Image: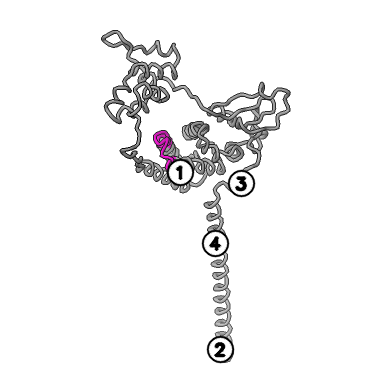
Amino acid sequence: MKYVWLFFFFSSFCKAEEEEDCFNKENLLLSLNYDMAAKKRKKDHMNNNAKVPYFHREKWIYVHKGSTKERHGYCTLGEAFNRLDFCSAIKDTRRFNYVVRLLELIAKSQLPSLSGVAQKNYMNILERVVQKVLNDQQNIRPIKELLQMLYVSLCGLVQDMGKSVLVGNINTWLHRMENILQWHQQLDSIQINRPTSTSMTLTDLPINLQLNIMQRLSDGRDLVSLGQVCPSLGDLAEDRLLWKRLCHHHFTDRQIRKRLMVSDKGLLEWKKMYSKLSRCYPHREQYSDTLHFCTHCHILFWKDTNHPCTANNPESCTMSLSPQDFINLFKF
């Protein structure tokens, strides 16, 4: 009986010791999980407060046009977004349309090639673009079109996630798609403040000045929207010379000759021709400011920023880049 009692006592002691060890291990795991969760929350908080934590002092980047995956180095789209400071570029009215067009081209074809850093920088720039539009109440339509294009592209790519089309976790992309929808809804809810009755409006100006202002519009959709404001502007928006200017601005003479449309009175239907030409050919791209590339030292930079060029005549080595040219620099 004595040995039986000792056996049960020893078994109970070992069991209690095992339970205590398990308890200590569980507490240790819980503590580690808590510390990891706390660190993750702290990191997320820092990322949210400073989404682009660091910008290089030099607003240029070296790009080797003959790059390969081995020689490309850090010269990627994600690094270019950071080094060229696109978040500040959108605040400049001269560069805004250029950056927006660049975001459109990436949304069309470059999303699968974006690294994690490039994705983050892309979404940060897009968010700042939306915030600028919400604050300024300008360029609403092109940004809504950009968001819609990006959302449609992501819908098609997310369905192919099993093929590893997009870099990153699918839940991250779904969260980004939710943000895109929210931004689109915010833009839909914008209500432009109407001027007071004592303020001067466009229709108070002489007709020749109204036509002169309309001639500054480079998109036919803007001209149509302006014509819908009131009957007097609607009549001016039908002016044949306005639509003739738009046709010759965006399209070549050869393209125009292929799409000639004549009315019953023998006059060219410039407005209908513009609509047809827009469906057949891309519009001419024109920007107040663009990125430039130095063919001598292979450096990409904004025009008003200096870069360490060693050429005797740096201006002769500098070429302006369209948004598509910029993307082509980063294609292997």
The kind of residue on which mark 4 rests is: Ala
Q: Identity of the amino acid at label 3?
A: Tyr
For marks 1 and 3 on the same chain, the one whose residue lies earlier in the sequence: 3
Who comes first in sequence, dot 1 or dot 2?
Answer: 2
Q: Quadrant of the C terminus?
A: top right
Dominant secondary structure of the residues highlighted in magenta in the image = helix
The residue carrying mark 3 is 54
SS assignment at label 2: helix
- Reading the chain from its start, which is encountered first: label 2 or label 4? 2
Query: How far is mark 2 from mark 4, CA to CA?
Result: 49 Å
Label 3 to label 2: alpha-carbon separation:
71 Å
Q: Alpha carbon of mark 4 to alpha carbon of mark 1: how far?
A: 30 Å
Magenta span covers which residues?
133-146
Q: From this view, report whether residue 44 is shown above or below residue 293.
A: below
Mark 2–mark 4 contact, CB under 8 Å? no
Q: How many numbered markers are drawn?
A: 4
Query: Magenta stretch containing residue 108, yes or no?
Result: no
Q: Camera-side residue: 13 or 194? A: 194
Q: Which residue is mark 1?
A: 131
Give percent across and percent down for residue 113: 54, 36
Q: Look at discs 1 and 3 and give the one toward the viewer.
A: 1
Which dot marks residue 38? Answer: 4
Category of crowding for the residue at label 1, using alpha-carbon neighbours closer than 10 angstroms: few (below 14), some (14–19), many (at least 20): some
In the image, residue 30 above or below residue 199: below
Foreground disc of the pair 3, 2: 3
Tag of residue 5? 2
Q: Give the label, 2 or 4, closer to the camera.
A: 4
Nearer the viewer's eye, disc 4 or disc 1? 1
Split into 4 quadrants, where in the image is the N terminus?
Answer: bottom right
Q: Identify the residue at horizontal 36%, vertical 11% (top origin).
A: 260
SS for tag 1?
helix
73 left or right, relative to 257: right
